[in-house]
Image (cartoon, rainbow, N blue to C red):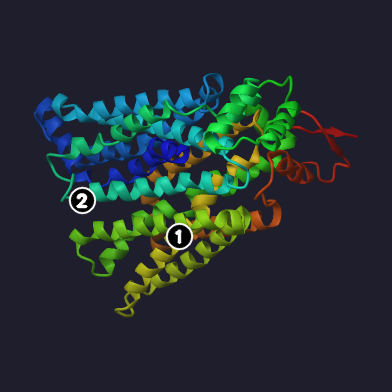
Amino acid sequence: MLAGVLGIGGSFQYGIQVSVIASPAVHVQGFVNCTWLWRYNAPVDDSTNQLIWSFIVAVLSLGAWVGAIHSGSLPVTHGRKKALLFNNVVAIVAALVMLFSRMAKSFEMILLGRFLYGYNVGLGLSVHLMYLGESSPKKLRGFLTLTTSIFISLGKISGQIIGIKEIMGTEEMWPYLLAVSGVPAILQFVTLLFFPDSPSHLYIDKGDVEGSKRALQWLWQQEDLKLELQDMQKERASSQGEKLKTVKDVLGSRCVRWQLLTLAIPCAGVQFCGINALYFYAFDIFHESGVPADQMHYFAIGLGATELITVTLCSFLIDHSGRKKLMAYGYFLMGVIMSILTVMLSIKDLNSWIPYVNIALIFCVIGIYGLGPSGVSMALPADLFLQAWRPSAYVISGTISWLSMFLLGMLFGYIVNGLGQFCFMVFVVYCIMSSAFLIRFVPETKGKTMVEIMEDFNKLNFKNSGADTETSDNGFETKF
């Protein structure tokens, strides 16, 4: 139940905001032109209109970055639950701003609404992962944290479906379409009131042993929680007397160096695998294949459905196959298939059947992404850091993810113009490098406690130092 409640107002919001903005593009640009004409008695020129529209799309990432920064302090100071309740209020305000933008004849309200939605997504995604990972039994931690990706995919396909012209993708309905995220925000706000806060937060941060025990009993429906409480006691003892680690501490400390590299390269850097670019380029490939323009949205729904199905399948495999294998081999296969796609795009005019092969290759890449990198990039960060380090680590993860998404959103059009179909080679290099990094360096985290995972990473962090590792600020110190 907790996974469902956190998902509907957490990562679902990310998915729906990524996809829902595409459908009303023509209507919003028309509204900008009408507003400009009403204010200045002249139509807006095409370049200005395109610039305003591009910023409406991209400002979501900037808002998400601000939200990710606050995810390091709000859930620690006020608890995971209260941080999410506040976050839902932000989404409700954003929905109201969107709803009344046409009435107020202000496209600036759309910009403000998108920024607030971005803040909601950035804060909500980080706290969702933190809250769920800390509340999950270690044997189910991979499966439950991977539901984050399931809700992202569900949000994407929901946005694509409600955005078609038969439902809300019309001239009259676009303000209601942009305001739709207020509904899941209200649902989460109401239902989350009945749930306890994160057991780890209560025990380790607040020292509330009884409160943590009651939360675990409520969430797990078990009475015998001795082993879990002992694990939290060890983690609390390892950080006893410590202050919460800052972003500077995480960036500068040797004892979390390889955890940080794992967080940054294959996880937070998942934007550079080219999946969003592939969604963007898919319409051009559909067009080259002879797909009618009025049917392309339905093919896009097919892409979203493929990702949702494969991410759901990944949730059943992750605690059996492990995070490392699914992500590493997923990246490798994505790199191989995108290399083939690049070649096929270069020779697409040689035969009439080649464009259809390209469509199949796009579906294959998205399917593999859902089966590996999409889900594991959400589940793995929850395994990497102890309680004192986790909030600042999520700030770093969010910063990398959202700024890279902003840069790709602004620059990808220029990359396509400059490189054409060879633009995918940029993403191929990232996928192959990430795969090699995971296989060579990252230990498997499946079924291990946080302290056991930390011990595995310390073999890398203190390699070649002649060091013996004992308890310190990360649970270990270097003893020479």
Q: On the image, which quarter does residue 67 sit in?
A: top left
Q: Is residue 268 left or right of residue 274?
A: right
Q: Amino acid at mark 2?
A: Ile
Residue ID for mark 2? 164
Residue 147 x, y percent position in the rendering: 47, 46
Q: Amino acid at mark 1?
A: Phe
Instruction: Name the secondary structure under disc 1.
Output: helix
Q: Residue furthest right?
A: 480
Q: Can residue 201 be spotted in the picture?
A: no
Q: What residue is shown at x 91% (from left), y 34% (from top)? A: 480
Which of the labelled discs sits on residue 191, or is there none?
none
Residue ID for mark 1? 424
Instruction: Name the secondary structure under disc 2.
Output: loop
Residue 257 x, y percent position in the rendering: 70, 39
Q: Is residue 419 left or right of residue 435?
A: left
Q: What residue is shown at x 74% (from left), y 43% (from top)? A: 452
- Residues under labels 2 and 1: Cα distance? 29 Å
Q: Is residue 425 left or right of residue 298?
A: right
Contact check, label 2 and label 1, Cβ < 8 Å: no
Q: Is residue 198 left or right of residue 89?
A: right
Q: What residue is shown at x 37% (from left), y 35% (from top)? A: 60
447 and 430: which is toward the camera: 447
Q: Can residue 203 be spotted in the picture?
A: yes
